[in-house]
Every structure is written in structure tokens, then in C-alpha cells.
Image: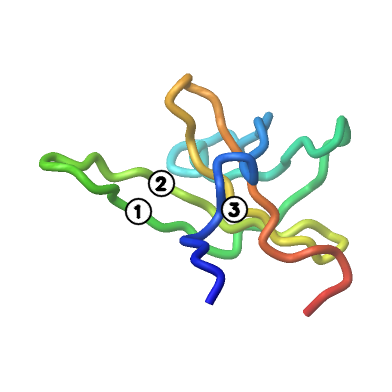
Amino acid sequence: MSGSTGPSAADWQPARVRFMASGRAEQTPVALEVAGRWLQVTLLAEELVTGPGPEPTPTRRYRLEAGDGRVFLLRPHGDGGWRWRLLRPAGRV
């Protein structure tokens, strides 16, 4: 057993995100900037997660798929921005 407990902070990259604009849809990501290029993404899943602590605050996370098959996990960051992590590379199913 490797002793790894999951992704490290280094796995999360700063993100710029574009959202759909209208009502509830404002919260739906439609594009993600990766390596200086904007990728159109499709929302696969949205979830609320809570962290440890006496009064954990729920945080919204998104699973997004790019046209090349890559799947990203997107979450808000404490600085008011966003962070992404690659869940599946391009071309893998």
C-alpha cells in the first residue's frame, strides 16, 4: 500500500472559468482555460461536499468533460478563484 490519501494540493491548478449566463444557469461552467487555451466543456456532474470541522461549509464541485475526452474536477478556492484537477486524460474511456 502506498500510503497516499488522495490528490495533493500540487494536483490542483488555478483556473479561469466561463459560466452560462441566465438564471440558475449562471452556475453552469461552459468553458475552462487549460494551458492558455479555452476548452468548451460539458457538465457531467455537480455535487456539494463538506469538509471536516465543527461547522463545515458545503462547497460546490463540478465534473467537466472537454471535447477531446479529458475530464476535469473544478472547485472554488479560498481566494475567490477556481482550481481544476485532471481526472481522466484525453482519449481514455
**Which residue, given by chain and number where applicable, does mark 3 sit on?**
73
Q: Is residue 13 above or below residue 60?
A: above
Question: Residue visible at 70% across and 54% down?
Answer: 86
The quadrant in which residue 64 appears is bottom right
Which mark is drawn over residue 48? 1
Q: Is residue 69 above or below residue 22?
A: below
Mark 3 Cα shell of 10 Å, populated few (<14), some (14-19), many (≥20):
some
Question: Residue visible at 87% across and 30% down?
Answer: 36
**Which residue, given by chain and number where applicable, does mark 2 sit on?**
60
Question: Residue visible at 88% across and 71% down?
Answer: 91
Identify the amino acid type marked 2. Answer: Arg
Q: Earlier in the sequence, mark 1 or mark 3?
A: 1
Identify the amino acid type marked 3. Answer: Leu
Compared across the picture, whether 22 is left or right of 55 comes to right
The quadrant in which residue 87 appears is bottom right
Question: Residue visible at 43% across and 42% down?
Answer: 24
Front residue (pair 15, 31)? 15
Q: CA distance from mark 2 to mark 3?
A: 11 Å
Q: Is residue 71 above or below residue 25?
A: below
Residue 4 pos. (x, y %): 52, 62
Q: Earlier in the sequence, mark 2 or mark 1?
A: 1
Q: Pick out the residue farthest to the left.
A: 54
Compared across the picture, whether 79 is left or right of 63 comes to left
